[in-house]
Image (cartoon, coloured by chain):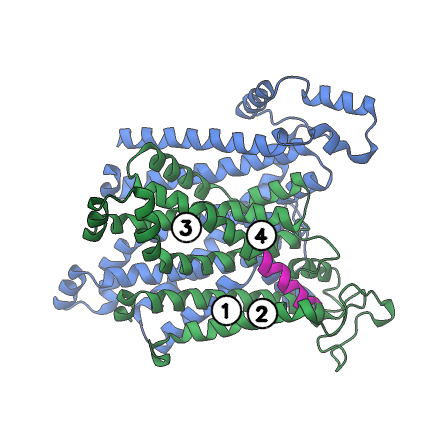
Amino acid sequence: MTLRSVPPALLIGAALSSVFVLLALISFAWTPHPVDGVTIANRLQPFSPTHPLGTDQLGRDILSMLMVGAQTSIAVALIAVGIGVALGVPLGLAAAANRGSLLDEVIMRGNDLIFAFPSLVIAILITARYGPSATNAILAIGIFNIPVFARVARGGALPIWTLDYILAARTAGKGKIRISAEHIFPNITNLLIVQATIQFSLGILAEAALSYVGLGAQPPIPSWGRMLAEAQTMIYTHPMLAVLPGLAIVLMVLGLNLMGDGLRDALDPRLRRAR
Amino acid sequence: MLRYILIRALSLGLSLIVASIVIFAVIEVIPGDPASFMLGLNATDENLAALRADLGLDGSKIDRYFAWIGGMVTGDFGTSYTYRVPVSDLVLDRIWVSLPLALFALTLSTLIAFPIGIIAAARRGTAADFSIMGATQLGIAIPNFWFAMLLVLVFAVSLQWFSAGGFPGWDDPLAALKSLLLPAIALALPQASILARVMRSALLETLDQDYIRTARAKGLTQGQAIRRHALRNAMIPVLTIIGLQFSFLLAGAIIIENVFFLPGLGRLIFQGITQRDLVVVESVTMLLVFAVILVTFLVDITYALVDPRLRRK
C-alpha cells in the first residue's frame, strides 16, 4: 500500500493520538514543572512563557498536569483493552470452534446480557464498593471489554471455519486449538486491531467519567477527569481550567476514532471499493 | 408470535436473575463485611452488631439474597441507613427527575439525528455529507459531562439565560423543563451523533437496493424514493440504536445529574456511595438495570410486531 492510498482519516487520527502518546512518554522523564509541587503563591496564573497553559488553584503547571494525566488515561484504557483481548479473544475463538455447543450458547447469551447492562453503572458500583483507584477503574472497564472482543473474535472466526484450507488442516490432523491459533487467529487480527482502537477510545472516555466523579485514579496522580471535576467550582472565574483537560480528552478520543475508521478502510479492501 | 414473546420473556427473567446475582455479589459477597464498610473507622463493636442485625447480615448469604429479591419484587427496597426512610420513597421522589431527563434527551437526540442523517445520506459524497460526518465524529469524542460544563459556561455564566443547576420541581412545569434543557442537550449530543451515523449508513444501504432503482426508474425523485420506500426500511437498525441509547441515557444521566445538581437517581446513587449507604446503592442500581433490561425487551417485542421476519429467529 502506497502512502497515497492511506485513508486521510488514518493519517490525521494516528498523528493526533501519537502526539498524546508522545507527551505521556516524555512526561515519564521530564515535565516543564513538577506535578506534585504545590506552590500557592503561583496559583491560578494565566498563560505565560513559564507556564504555557497557566497554573491551577494549587499553583501546579497545567501543561505538566495534562502530560502526566495522559499517562493515566492511556495506561488505564490500554490495560483495559489488554484484559479484553487476553480473555475475550480465546473465549470467542473457542465459541467459534465449537459452534452450537453449550459453550458457544453460554458465551453468546452471556454477551447479550452484558450488552444490556448499563456498563457505567456497574463500573461505578465496582469502584464504589472496592474503593476508588486506577486499578479498580481498569478492572471495571476491562470486564466490559471481554464480551466485546469475544463477539468480534467469534464473528470473524465463523466464516473462516467454512473455508477449504481449514478442512485441509483438519484432514492433516490438526486439532481445534491448533487450527484456531495457527489459521484462524492470524486471519482475524485486522478485525481485532480495529476493535481495539475503538475500545481504547471508549476506555479513555470511561476513565475520564470515572475519575470525574472521583472513582478513578486518586490524588496526587493527575488525571484529566479529576482536573475537570476540580475546575468545576472555579468555572465562573477561571473557565480555562475546565476547558483545557476536556479539550485533551476530545482530541485524544477523536484521534483514536479517526484512526479506527481509517484502519478499517485500509485493512478491509471490500470497503475501499465502496468509497 | 406468542411463542416469540414467551422466549423473550424467559430471557428477560434470566437476565434479571443474573443481574441481581452480580449486583448482590459485588456489594455483599466478595471480601469485606458490608457493616464495617458502612460504618468506616468509627465502628464500635456494639454499632457493628446492631447494624448487622439491622441489615440481616447474621443470616446466611443465600437467605439474604432471597430476602433482598423478595423485597424488591414486592416494592420493599430496604431502608436507607443514612436517611432512615424506605429506599422506595427516595426512589419515588427522584425518578421524576431522571426519567423525564432521559426521555427529554432521547427526544432531542432523535430530532437532531434524523434530519442530519437523512441529509448526509441523500447528499452522499458532497460537502454537506462531509461536514455532517465530521461534526458527528467530534460529537462522539466529546465527553457529555464536559459538554455540560461548556454549556454552563456559555449559557449560565456568560449569557445568563439559564441557572447553572438545581431543579425547581414540577409545580411549575415550564421552569422544570427549562432546568432540564441544558442537561438534556448535554446528554443528547453524543447520542445524536451516533444515531445520525447509523441513520446515514442504514439509509445508504437501502438506497442501494433494487426496489429503489425500480422506484427511480418509474420516475420518482430521490427525495420521493427516500420518503416512500427507503426510510421505512432503514428504520430497523435505527430503532435498535434508539432502544440501546435509552440505557446509555439513564447511565449517562447519573453523571450529568451531578454536573447540574439535579436531585435524580444518579445523585441518589452518589450520595449513597459517599455516605456508604450500601442499601441505597444496591437497590437503586438494581432498579436502573431492571429499567434498562425491560426497555431492551420491549424494543425486541415491538420489532417482532413491526417486522414479521424477526419472529422466526
Give the CA separation, mark 1 to mark 3: 26 Å
Does residue A16 appear left or right of residue A150 in this picture?
Answer: right
Q: Name the residue at the bottom extreme.
A: A49
Q: Subunit of mark 3?
A: B
As for residue A66 lying within the magenta part, the answer is yes
Image disc number at residue B18: none
Q: Amino acid at mark 3?
A: Ile
Does residue B166 appear left or right of residue A20 in this picture?
Answer: right
Image disc number at residue B177: 4
- Give the labeled residue for mark 3: B242
Contact (CB < 8 A) between labels 2 and 4?
no
As for residue B19 lying within the magenta part, the answer is no
Q: Subunit of mark 1?
A: A
- Give the labeled residue for mark 2: A20
Which color is chain B depicted in? blue
Q: Percent position (x, y) of residue B187?
A: 54, 55
Camera-near label (1 vs 3) is 1
* Residue B142 to residue A167: above or below: below
